[in-house]
Image (cartoon, rainbow, N blue to C red):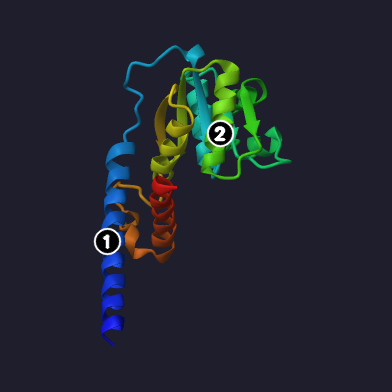
């Protein structure tokens, strides 16, 4: 019985520690990444590439808009999966967008698809090969806000010689505007999503 009580206490302590860490993780994401770093002094466009880690149409559109605004000379959409074409990616762009024609043009001339990566570590390896091919010294990394801590860890580990600049796509789950959706802990689906990402982040720190 004593062993059972100690085991139960340990489990409760671990769960409490995870919950506290998860709250800190969400707070850090909101504070650190919800302000886009576009006010900084940027390096040369020709020395900078933009990398989108796939996972949603908003990431792709964000990356294309950054390319359109000359924050980099080319865009890599990493982890698209085999068989995915540029036409498939173009379908993610809202056709009613004011600059849709320009974004479609950029897809044809200045976008590369990375089809080998199947996870975040693979995104980093794929991006490293692409950056070396084009001689980039800086990469603008575009992904969901809650995915950035783990992505930055893998990208900076894979290519310490290249400056990795985070650019968050704010997720609806962690949107910090004054709306009910900010209460992320009230949605079981959101808790599961963020908890899984936080667990992956912890594992990546020791793996």
The reply, left or right, for residue 162 in relation to residue 106 is left
Residue drawn 58% across the image and 17% down it: 134
Outermost residue, front side: 3
Whole-Å distance between the Cαs marked 1 and 2? 32 Å
| Vertical placement of residue 70 versus 85, above or below | above
Residue 201 location, x and y as percent? 40, 49
Quarter of the image for the N terminus: give it: bottom left
* Residue to which mark 1 is pinned: 17
> Can residue 98 be spotted in the picture?
no
User: Which of the two residues, 57 or 45, is positioned nearer the viewer here?
Assistant: 45
Q: Secondary structure at mark 2?
A: helix
Query: Which of these two is toward me, 105 or 130?
Result: 130
Q: Secondary structure at mark 1?
A: helix
Residue position marked by numbered label 2 in the rendering:
125
Image point 47% across, 17% down: which residue? 137
Residue 2: x and y in percent read 25, 84
Residue 54 location, quadrant: top right
The answer, for residue 6, to whether it is visible in the render is yes
Q: Residue at x 56, y 20 (%)?
A: 132
Which label is found at residue 62?
Answer: none
Which residue is drawn at the image coordinates 38% and 41% (left, top)? 149
């Amino acid at each position: 019985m004593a062993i059972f009580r100690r085991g139960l206490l340990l489990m409760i302590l671990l769960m409490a520690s995870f919950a506290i860490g998860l709250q800190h993780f969400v707070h850090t994401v909101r504070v650190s990444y919800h302000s886009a770093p576009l006010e900084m002094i940027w390096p040369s466009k020709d020395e900078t590439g933009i990398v989108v880690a796939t996972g949603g149409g908003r990431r792709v559109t964000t990356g294309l808009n950054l390319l359109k605004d000359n924050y980099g000379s080319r865009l890599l959409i990493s982890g698209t999966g085999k068989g995915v074409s540029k036409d498939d990616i173009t379908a993610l762009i809202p056709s009613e967008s004011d600059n849709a024609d320009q974004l479609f043009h950029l897809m044809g001339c200045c976008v590369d698809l990375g089809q080998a990566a199947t996870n975040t570590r693979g995104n980093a390896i794929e991006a490293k090969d692409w950056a070396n091919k084009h001689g980039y010294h800086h990469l603008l990394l575009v992904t969901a806000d809650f995915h950035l801590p783990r992505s930055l860890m893998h990208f900076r580990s894979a290519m310490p010689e290249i400056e990795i600049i985070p650019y968050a796509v704010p997720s609806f789950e962690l949107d910090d505007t004054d709306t009910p959706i900010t209460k992320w802990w009230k949605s079981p689906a959101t808790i599961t999503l963020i908890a899984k990402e936080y667990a992956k982040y912890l594992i990546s720190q020791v793996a």
